[in-house]
Amino acid sequence: MEPSDYSKLIRRDKVTDTAATTFPDSVEIPEGFIRTDELTNHGADEAVIQQMKDSTAEFFGLPQESKNAVAVRGGGFEGFGHHFNEPATDKLDWAECLLLGTQPVQTRNMEFWPTNPPTFRYALDRYSVEMTNLARRLLGFMAADLGVTPETLFSAFSNKTQSMGIHRYPPCRNPDKVLGMTPHTDGFGLTLLLHVDDTPGLQIRRGGRWFPVHPLPGAFVVNVGDVLDVLSNAAYGSVEHRVLPHAERSRTTVVVFQDASVDGMVAPLPELLLKGDEALYKSIGRLDFSKGHLRALAQGTQFLDSLKTSS
Ligand SMILES: O=C(O)CCC(=O)C(=O)O
Ligand SMILES: [Fe+2]
């Protein structure tokens, strides 16, 4: 793998359009939305990725009662079902989703890990490790870009929670009437999104407008979450995104969230502040951060705004 390929992702200035996107040349790719469209040699094992895709597609193809074997229970997050329906709008997102905690290994709730298809658990386990490693490679380049030691970012991310959202958005004849996923920013460190098929649907908001992110074969979409936004002291901004359903085709994605914190806190990296940077965010405990993030989502507000030191 060529380091230069990774460093391309980290650029925060103008990134020129590639064939796979619909960003007009004049539009800057949003800060912090570090896309891996040129990065087909990301170093993750293709066989593992393929098995993850195949198992995912097989799982969603099963009859409803099979999928409900791992249905979400009570007020819990993990399991299969309809998550993310916005109480404020009373609208159900046009999606089915399997949510799982995948790392650290000892925190896994295996009752939510499907045994059908029989390859799924194995695929999930191997994919989980590949994504931990891919994130680590990205973090190495981010550290260089931020001017901090790699260990600073590695330790912020190591042994933290990794979770997966495995989504299927069925086709919808009235795509303008519903959303596949409500606008939000991700409430973790780093998000690694794999398109299982080539159906478009993901959009990001920039300057009040929505821009489509088209799937590119063999590439990951890498999204900065709110936690990394704070850790990087706003060098990498998280970006609001949403999913629109497609009129004729279903769309399936596997989304991995790598969490991060420093001594249980979400705060600008001390090493950045030691260099003399002014903290742009207040520090907050990891749990309070989650609560605030969820509350803001329900209210349709931006949680990070409330953490800005200038506000
Ligand atoms: O499926 C997608 O394209 C996006 C999913 C997403 O934004 C999420 O799981 O947070
Ligand atoms: Fe998201």
Image: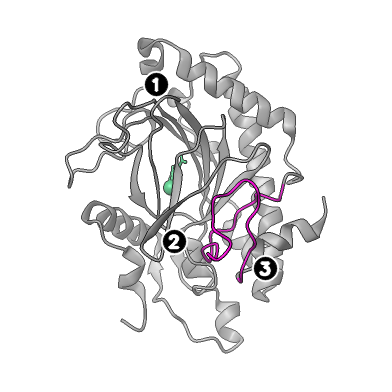
Badge 2 density bin: few <14, some 14–19, many ≥20, Cα 10 Å: many
Q: Position of residue 143 (x, y in %)?
A: 67, 68
Q: Can you identify the residue that label 1 sits on?
A: 70
Badge 1 density bin: few <14, some 14–19, many ≥20, Cα 10 Å: many
Disc assigned to residue 143: 3
* Residue 16 part of the magenta-drawn span: yes
Q: Quadrant of ligand 1?
A: top left
Image quarter where the C terminus lies is: bottom left
Q: Earlier in the sequence, mark 2 or mark 1?
A: 1
Q: Can you identify the residue that label 2 sits on?
A: 226
Q: Which residues are magenta?
A: 13-39
Q: Position of residue 308 (x, y in %)?
A: 36, 77
Q: Earlier in the sequence, mark 2 or mark 3?
A: 3
User: In the rendered view, does 31 fall on the left or right side of 219?
Assistant: left
| Label 1 secondary element | helix
Amino acid beneath label 1:
Val
User: In the rendered view, does 194 fall on the left or right side of 9?
Assistant: left
